[in-house]
């Protein structure tokens, strides 16, 4: 499939197509090569539980990495937040 698309684009770039062949047809992901409609894909029944198990570890890992980097920057005096930044008066 990919090689035939590549050859088609090569021929289009060179201008070796007849005038009636200038139109490019796009194949949708919902049809097969013959034009038949593909069956509906199977659904994974995890739902909300799967979402929680995907998001929570990502947030925890990201927060841990951020905390370690902030501590490293502060220990090496690369970035130390000043007390003047608090404008909550």
Image: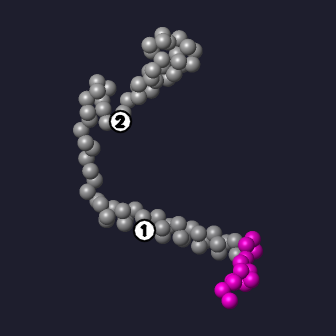
Residue at 55 percent of width and 14 percent of height: 15
Contact between labelled residues 2 and 1, with CB atoms less than 8 Å apart: no
Q: Position of residue 6 (x, y in %)?
A: 49, 23
Residue at 26 percent of width and 50 percent of height: 43
> Does residue 43 appear to the left or right of 65 in the view shown?
left
Q: Position of residue 11 (x, y in %)?
A: 52, 16
Q: Is residue 61 magenta?
A: no
When the figure is inspected, residue 50 is found, relative to residue 3, above or below; the finding is: below
Q: Which residue is mark 2?
A: 29
| Of callouts 1 and 2, the N-terminal one | 2
- Indicate the colouring scheme: one colour
Q: Position of residue 66 (x, y in %)?
A: 59, 69
Task: Name which quarter of the figure residue 10 lies in.
Answer: top right
Tag on residue 56? 1
Label 2 residue SS: loop
Task: Name which quarter of the figure residue 50 lies in.
Answer: bottom left
State which quarter of the image contains the N terminus.
Answer: top left
State which quarter of the image contains the C terminus.
Answer: bottom right
Q: Is residue 36 visible?
A: yes
When the figure is inspected, residue 79 is found, relative to residue 9, above or below; the finding is: below
Q: Is residue 3 visible?
A: no
Please provide the residue range marked out in magenta: 77-89
């Amino acid at each position: 499939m990919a090689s035939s698309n590549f050859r088609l684009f090569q021929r289009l770039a060179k201008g070796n197509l007849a005038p009636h062949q200038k139109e490019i047809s796009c194949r949708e992901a919902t049809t097969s090569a013959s034009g038949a409609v593909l069956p509906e894909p199977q659904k994974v029944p995890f739902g909300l539980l799967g979402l929680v198990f995907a998001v929570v570890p990502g947030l925890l890992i990201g927060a841990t990495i951020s905390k370690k980097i902030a501590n490293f920057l502060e220990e090496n005096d690369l970035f130390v937040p000043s007390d003047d930044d608090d404008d909550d008066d």
